[in-house]
Amino acid sequence: MNIIKEPPTPDELAAMYIEAGWLQDPSSDKMTKVVSSPSEWYVVRDLTHAALGIGLFITDYARYAFIIDVIVLKIHHYKGIGTAIISEIVSDCRKLGIDNINLWPSKGKVPFYEKLGFYSLPSDQPHMKFDTGK
Ligand SMILES: CC(C)(COP(=O)(O)OP(=O)(O)OC[C@H]1O[C@@H](n2cnc3c(N)ncnc32)[C@H](O)[C@@H]1OP(=O)(O)O)[C@@H](O)C(=O)NCCC(=O)NCCS
C-alpha cells in the first residue's frame, strides 16, 4: 500500500463518492473539474495500482487547512488506511506551517477523528452550509 500525492482519475473519484453514498450518478464533467482543482490530493494504491482510498484538503498555506474528503472503499475499512491518509495530511500541514486543520465529519465519524486528535467545536460554533441548488 502506497500513499501517492496526486489526484485519482475522474472515474476513481466517482467510484469513491458512489461507494460512500454521497453521489448517485456523478457527472464526468464535475469529476474532471474536482480532480483538476488546486487541492492537495492523496490516493492510497495497492501493488496493482488500484485506488483503495482517497483524501484531499484545501488550504491558504498559512492559517487554515480544510479536509474536504476522506473515503476508503468499504472492503478495505478497518485496515488503517483512513488513519494513514489523515496522519499524512497532518504531517504535511505541520511541515507547511499551517496553523490548524478543519473538517466536517460525516454522521458517525466523530470517534474516528477523535482517535486521531481532532476535537469538536462547541455547539454555538457549528459548521454552516449554504446549498446553491446546483
Ligand atoms: C471514515 C473512514 C475513512 C475510516 O477509514 P478506515 O480506513 O476504515 O479507518 P481506519 O482503519 O484507519 O480506522 C482507524 C480507527 O478508527 C476506527 N473507526 C473507523 N471507522 C469508524 C467509525 N465509522 N466509527 C467509529 N470508529 C471508527 C477504527 O476502529 C480504528 O480504531 P482502532 O485503531 O482503535 O481499531 C471510512 O470509514 C470511510 O471511508 N467511510 C465512508 C466515507 C466517510 O464517511 N468519510 C469521512 C468523511 S468526513
Image (cartoon, grey):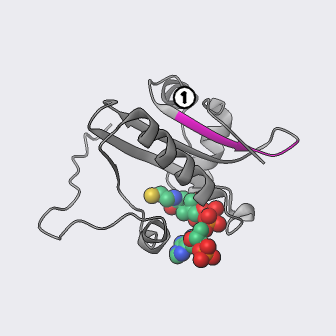
Can I make out residue 23 in this image? no
Could you tell me residue 126's position as x and y percent? 19, 62
- On whether ligand 1 comes within 8 Å of the CB at mark 1, the answer is no
Q: Residue 2 magenta-drawn?
A: no
Q: Examine the rendered structure and indicate whether residue 11 appears above or below residue 78.
A: above
Quadrant for ligand 1? bottom right
Which residue is nearer to you in this view: 120 or 71? 120
Q: Main secondary structure of the magenta part?
A: strand
Q: Residue furthest left?
A: 124
Could you tell me residue 131's position as x and y percent? 25, 46
Could you tell me residue 114's position as x and y percent? 42, 70
Can I make out residue 87 in this image? yes
Residue at point 45% right, 74% down?
Answer: 111
Residue at which label 1 appears: 35
Residue at point 58% right, 53% down?
Answer: 71
Residue range in magenta is: 41-47
Dot 1, crowdedness within 10 Å: few (<14), some or many (≥20)? many
Residue at point 62% right, 54% down?
Answer: 84
Which residue is nearer to you in this view: 26 or 108? 108
Q: How many numbered badges does the structure rendering display?
A: 1
Which residue is nearer to you in this view: 79 or 13? 79
Q: Is residue 23 left or right of residue 49?
A: left
Q: Give the image quarter of residue 43.
A: top right
Q: Is residue 45 left or right of residue 103?
A: right
